[in-house]
Image (cartoon, rainbow, N blue to C red):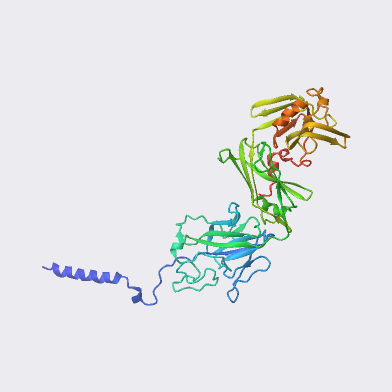
Amino acid sequence: MLRRPLVAGLSASLAIALAACTATPDAERGSGAAPSADPHPAPEVTVSAVDDDDASPTPTSATGASGTPEADSTTGAADADSKSIELDPSGHFALTVSGGEFTEVTVTDADHPEVSVDGTFDSGAQGSDPSAPATASATETESANAGGSASDADATPSEDGTPSGASTDRNNSTDSGGDADPQGTRWVSSYGLAGDAEYEWKATTVAPDGATHEASGTITTTEPQGRSARIFTVIGDDQEVGVAAPIIVNIGATVPESYRDDIEHRLSVEVTDEDGTEREVEGSWGWLYDTDGISRVHYRPKEFWPEHSKVKVTMALEDVPFSQTRFGEKDVSLDFSIGREQTTTADAKTHRMIVTRGDETIMDYPASLGAARSPSFNGTHIVMSKAANYTMTSERWGYSTPVRWAVRIHNNGEFIHGAPWSAGSQGSANVSHGCINLTNERAKEYYDSAIYGDPVIVKGSSVSLSKEDSDVADWVYDWDEWQELSALD
């Protein structure tokens, strides 16, 4: 009988307690209520010119009193919308992010998408504060809900507390959940840019709350100054060459060392088999000494080329500065093939010349090499050219002698050729002025088999080839020495 009042009293108490715990709508709480958490503003990316001497960024635009970017007359110019920058050819640039860090940066040459535009990340070693607003944003992915342009460096807060220049549309950012890999607050290009070109950069940044954002912009360059210079290659298109043939590129100008890395990183070599399947071939470019105002850059593999390969060389050098007054005339491409593997070995001690194809010996001839006073040179030579009739001349030794079936293997005067006058010494004594003497019949057989780039190895002599006295000294260097001739790190 007494339980009914107790239950009624308990129900009333619960109703009062639940009412006290129920949230009051914002409109009923008054203006003093704390707002809900807003997403962190999107990081802002700034593009700057870089001083080549110290790699420090020099902003090329700044927001003036009128809000119009002010161009830096010495390093570059920014468009009025702050979404692009113009640099001189060979210029370097930096991307800097405030309010976050980079996770990825890509830069593409619109005319040469196959050319990588590399750069390095750091954490803003120039003293920049990652949390400070940038002086001029190149361009930030904008939200449909954003209160202003991403280029407004002094953006004012909107009603929801988010800076008006920041992206607030969560569809334009991604919560990475902490998986993004921050790389730093600054990215600097590693190589100078080509002239009269347009580059597009894209950057992915991560905000402190873990959300990722996209930014992009363009960089254009002015036309190069001075005169154009042509590019020449020794190998011709569709030519078949031997397995030791270097790729020789002669530049019709003298290239200072400070420009060589910008040129070399725009050179590429692709090797495939006869069916077009890629072959992994380790190789490197090397800059040899200049001759007669011409700079020379050669490419050779670590080992001889694999036989029956196809090689494609791409040189994206149009409007690329070669110096302060010279630049590339046009892009150049080269396609050639590697023939059968034929190697010739001439031994000054055994007085024989042996020619092999793969593991098979196809010629084994008695020969006469250079005499003691005019020895042949040890080392790897290559077939450079050949002539059915040729006149050997020497001021030093005072002769002018016509010969048959001459195959040049070095520009120091070494040939393989017919020498019927030394037939009695061939196979037993070295009596030549440095050449490899054969009978005319044997010389013709070798002549008919030889192609440009076939290796010719001389051994057993008293002297060796020098790195300084040949147009083709590529195989005189060991691999470590050759790699040091590259202009790239």
Identify the image quadrant of residue 425.
top right
Q: Give above or below for 346 relative to 289.
A: above
Q: Is residue 155 left or right of residue 230?
A: left
Quadrant (top left/top right/bottom left/bottom right) for the N terminus = bottom left
Identify the image quadrant of residue 197.
bottom right
The count of marks equals 0
Foreground pick, 450 / 200: 450
Q: Is residue 126 visible?
A: no
Foreground pick, 444 / 397: 444
Q: Which percent across, then down, holds residue 125?
A: 62, 60
Q: Is residue 371 left or right of residue 40?
A: right
Q: Which percent across, then down, holds residue 327?
A: 70, 56
Q: Which percent across, then down, holds residue 441?
A: 75, 26
Q: Residue furthest right?
A: 398
Foreground pick, 14 / 56: 56
What residue appears at the point 65 percent right and 32 percent down from the top-left corner?
A: 341
Q: Residue furthest front?
A: 389
Q: Give above or below for 370 relative to 32.
A: above
Q: Which percent across, then down, holds residue 231?
A: 70, 50
Q: Residue furthest left?
A: 1
What residue appears at the point 72 percent right and 33 percent down from the top-left corner?
A: 456
Foreground pick, 24 / 409: 409
Q: Is residue 459 visible?
A: yes
